[in-house]
Amino acid sequence: MNFPNHRPRRLRRKAAIRDMVREFQLQASDFIAPLFITEGSNIKEEIASMPGYYRYSLDMLNAELEELVEVGIRSVLVFVKVPDEKKDNKGTEALNDQGLMQQSIRHIKQHYPELFVMSDVALDPYSEYGHDGIVEDGEIINDVTTEVLAAMSVSHAVAGVDMVAPSDMMDGRVGAIRAELDKYGHENVGIMSYSAKYASAYYGPFRDALDSAPGFGDKKTYQMDPANAQEALREAALDIEEGADILMVKPGLPYLDIVQRISSTYNVPVSVYHVSGEYAMIKAAAEKGWLNEEDIMMESLIAFKRAGASLIATYFAKEAAKYLKSN
Ligand code: PBG
């Protein structure tokens, strides 16, 4: 295999041949659109650190859902912003059948039954400490938390969710959730587990969106150390054993190696979360005129496919799907 017999540039000479030999493609159904929902009515407020991204009250949500469906998005991932007075250290509001998450799931399923609805399962939006679990003496208590997460998952299932997405990183929660869902007859509700979720500074804008920043300390006793890779495979193995249907890696671009390792090691679909900080960085650079937003967006998204992800949760879902439709 040597030059001049081989001239790889022959396959790049024209758009037609480039299109013909392209190895990976993006399609709207690859994207999961995160939704931020807030209490009240007539609210559509932009998140300061996420330009072009909004929190919606339920009465304002349909216009957004309509647009998502129109451009071919098949799935949403629901997050709720909980007012301070409903936060405690037990996840009480997380289990409320009439809570905002449960209402949101019912709302979306009622108006857009064809949308595949996923719900975030973690206690941080409900926690007076802003932590993903129940706190005792300054520690996040694992097994008590997983019980609440399992009950929370059942409550989402009762509301009609298609798949729960535990983002908390407690040990054993996938198994606990699977068992509880099955116990109550929700064996068809799936689990997309955040298997390799790193303790990352890229979550900053998201915590602004939900007002969920930790009140003390950080999340390093449960989220993974960015310096570890082998550990991600162990987390993935545990989640598969416990019954996860899809494994997620988070954040996205800085952790492409993890996406690649997990997707080449295991035979379950891998998703990746292109997180809020990654979105904010692109938006900020584009605002300054330093990068071309559309090009960077599409280049970032195809990188996830190349690394082995089949699903991408991204705040660019709508924009990227629009782009794919018109190009
Ligand atoms: C909380 C949760 C976080 C994100 C998704 N679920 C933040 C955190 O762990 O502190 C981050 C998403 C993003 O940054 O876009 N369980």
Image: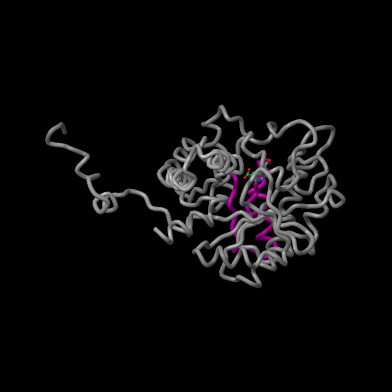
Q: Residue at x 47, y 43 (%)?
A: 292
Q: Is residue 154 visible?
A: no
Describe residue 214's horizontal placement relative to residue 273 as left or right.
Answer: right
The part of the image, by quadrant, that contains residue 201 is: top right
User: Where is residue 301 shown, x and y percent of the image?
Assistant: 46, 47
- Specify the segment rendered in magenta: 165-194
Q: Is residue 236 above or below residue 314?
A: above
- Residue 234 covered by magenta stretch: no
Tell whether 8 sits left or right of 68.
left
Quarter, ligand 1: top right
Give me the residue at 52% from left, 61% from top. 73
Asked if 189 appears above or below 147 in the picture, the reply is: below
Residue pictured at 48% horizontal, 39% vertical = 291
Task: Tell me the quadrant of the picture where the N terminus can be found.
Answer: top left
Q: Is residue 190 magenta?
A: yes
Foreground pick, 110 / 20: 20
